[in-house]
């Protein structure tokens, strides 16, 4: 931790700087955990957005079952930081990665997604050679067309294969109904979520009827959790970015408080209605939704590599050297641009958290 900045006013930080409002973050984590608890489902939040063990530990302290990782490298970082209950919600393929996973599973009972018999066999071989057990869930394609085996008989056939392979322990079913989250009208969105998640629940029933125990039925991300958490048979929800929220998810109707911002410095005022700052694409992403400068209603926002520029309708009372805070457009592709996040409470730096999963793309 960079203790030199502890106690500084956030305005005195060098920029660009990734900030998280600790009061909002803590409320979001507590409220989200309570929301799922009241619905009788577990919460295993995705960590690919925050990539910070410190945030994962806050989630675990509120009763999360564990966390989801996108990459094996993220799981290794989280496990080394004492995070438990890790699931990798993607396939780990090839001898280099399967050996790493098998070695990790000697120290931490990581769960990994599988959607093919060949991958299952190479995981089992790596586990036997390492003297470990790899816990697996079947990923089912519920509509995204990206990865996952088909629901029903194809998934049951794979479950039978997993159940008999020495070195593996079959845990259950997972899927992600992400294709439904952009449906604007609540009734059609609810219907689409229930249809997609129903494929998981029905496949779990087929496995159980075949004598294969199913402990986990995992689904539900930020933007779909209101509906997926109510489908009977679901055991846990993966919603992760809900603890930060951002412009994109606010546009989908997510109600948690936005807790993630980027602090910038005004570097140029080329005219009275144009403001240019030092936070561009290397500090904030614009791929999913544009960031929003707080305190302004910009007519437009434009990011280049090193500059974030916005236009206002009337002359802005900003001078070169002033600070502008931006609400993050999309957290998943913003956090990983930074080495650390500054935890802010009452306007001052209380914590500095390394983004330890940054760059862990293997």
Image (spheres, rainbow, N blue to C red):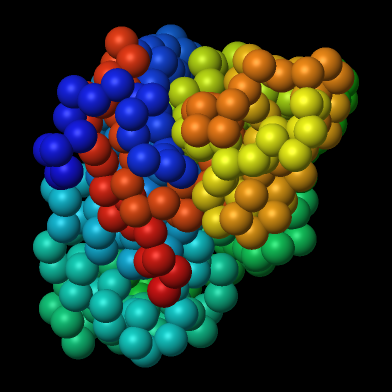
144 with respect to 126 (left or right): right
Residue sitting nearer the eye, 79 or 8: 8
238 with respect to 227 (left or right): left
- At which x and y percent is residue 264? 51, 37
Q: Quadrant of residue 36?
A: top left
Q: Quadrant of residue 356?
A: bottom left
Q: Quadrant of residue 40?
A: top left
Residue sitting nearer the eye, 134 or 57: 57
Marker count (numbered): 0
Residue 69 vs 322, above or below: the answer is below
Q: Quadrant of the C terminus?
A: bottom left
- At which x and y percent is residue 248? 69, 33
Q: Residue at x 46, y 80 (%)?
A: 93
The answer to whether residue 153 is seen in the rendering is: no
Q: Residue at x 17, y 43 (%)?
A: 2
- At which x and y percent is residue 266? 57, 35
Q: Residue at x 50, y 62 (%)?
A: 90
Residue 330 vs 246, above or below: the answer is below
The answer to whether residue 322 is seen in the rendering is: yes
- At which x and y percent is residue 298? 78, 25
Q: Residue at x 66, y 16 (%)?
A: 317
Q: Quadrant of the N terminus?
A: top left
Residue sitting nearer the eye, 127 or 31: 31
């Amino acid at each position: 931790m960079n203790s030199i900045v502890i106690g500084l006013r956030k305005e005195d930080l060098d920029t660009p700087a990734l900030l998280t409002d600790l009061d909002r973050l803590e409320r979001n984590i507590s409220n989200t955990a309570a929301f799922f608890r009241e619905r009788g489902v577990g919460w295993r939040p995705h960590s690919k957005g925050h990539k910070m063990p410190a945030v994962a530990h806050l989630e675990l302290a509120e009763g999360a079952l564990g966390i989801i990782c996108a990459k094996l490298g993220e799981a290794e970082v989280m496990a080394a930081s004492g995070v438990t209950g890790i699931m990798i919600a993607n396939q780990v393929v090839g001898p280099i990665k399967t050996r790493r996973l098998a070695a990790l599973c000697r120290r931490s009972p990581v769960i990994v997604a599988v959607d093919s018999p060949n991958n299952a066999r190479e995981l089992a071989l790596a586990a036997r050679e390492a003297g470990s057990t790899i816990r697996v869930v079947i990923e089912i394609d519920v509509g995204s067309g990206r990865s996952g085996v088909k629901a029903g008989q194809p998934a049951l056939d794979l479950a039978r294969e997993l159940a008999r392979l020495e070195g593996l322990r079959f845990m259950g079913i997972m899927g992600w109904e992400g294709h439904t989250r952009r449906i604007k009208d609540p009734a059609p969105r609810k219907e689409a979520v229930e249809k997609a998640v129903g494929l998981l629940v029905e496949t779990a029933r087929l496995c159980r009827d075949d004598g294969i125990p199913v402990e986990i039925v995992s689904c539900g991300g930020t933007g779909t959790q209101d509906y997926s958490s109510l489908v009977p048979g679901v055991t846990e929800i993966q919603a992760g970015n809900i603890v930060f929220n951002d412009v994109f998810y606010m546009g989908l109707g997510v109600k948690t408080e936005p807790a993630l911002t980027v602090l910038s410095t005004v570097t140029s005022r080329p005219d009275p209605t144009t403001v240019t700052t030092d936070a561009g694409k290397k500090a904030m992403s614009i791929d999913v939704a544009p960031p929003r400068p707080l305190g302004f209603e910009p007519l437009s926002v434009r990011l280049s590599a090193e500059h974030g520029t916005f236009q206002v309708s009337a002359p802005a009372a900003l001078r070169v050297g002033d600070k502008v805070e931006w609400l993050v457009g999309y957290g998943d592709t913003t956090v990983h641009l930074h080495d650390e996040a500054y935890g802010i409470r009452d306007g001052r730096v209380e914590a500095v958290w390394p983004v330890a999963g940054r760059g862990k793309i293997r």
